[in-house]
Image (tube, grey):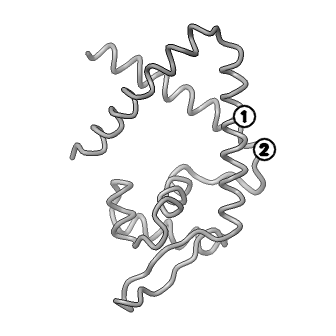
Amino acid sequence: MTDLADRLLGAVLGIRRVVRRRARAGVPGPPLPGAQVELLRVVADHPGIGVAGAARELHLANNSVSTLVNQLVDAGLLRREADPADRRAARLGVTAAAAERMAAWRRARTGLVADALAALSEEDIAAIEQALPSLEKLVGVLKEQP
């Protein structure tokens, strides 16, 4: 199992690294650190999430997420609003600029991977399609682990 885990991680990280580097050219603005991108994704997927909830999703400390929130608010990519139920708590949302940037990033990434998939054989594409449900289950198992 260890060899399989190592090969899987190598493949996934390799894909991610290459796509991230090549997709940057198609996205406006300066590149964002990975932690900021991850936080933007969490907030986009869970509009109104609080800092503590985002920290749980990202498996980070609350103060680390607070720092990221401040950076993204200053950059105009995240908005922080008071929670009507608890004025001390903040609810987070992505700005229009962040939504546009994320859409450009998604288009660039998807285009790169789609072009690469088109260069593979039908058998390789079918094998990747067959592996996706199991990979998605693996993500779920990893998220549930402490």
At 45% across and 78% down in the image, what residue appears?
91
The residue nearer to you, when weighing 98 against 114, is: 114
> Which kind of residue does numbered mark 2 sit on?
Gly
Image height of 23 relative to 18, above or below: below
> Which kind of residue does numbered mark 1 sit on?
Gly
Q: How many marks?
A: 2
* Residue behind mark 1: 111
Q: Nearer the viewer, mark 1 or mark 2?
A: 1
* Residue behind mark 2: 26
Decide: marks 1, 2 in contact (CB < 8 A)? Answer: yes
Residue at the extreme left? 146
* Left or right: 127, with 27 as reference point: left
Q: Quadrant of residue 113?
A: top right
Q: Marks 1 and 2, how far apart in space?
A: 10 Å
Q: Position of residue 25 (x, y in %)?
A: 78, 42
Tell me the SS state at disc 1. helix
* Left or right: 93, with 107 as reference point: left
At 68% across and 47% down in the image, what residue appears?
105
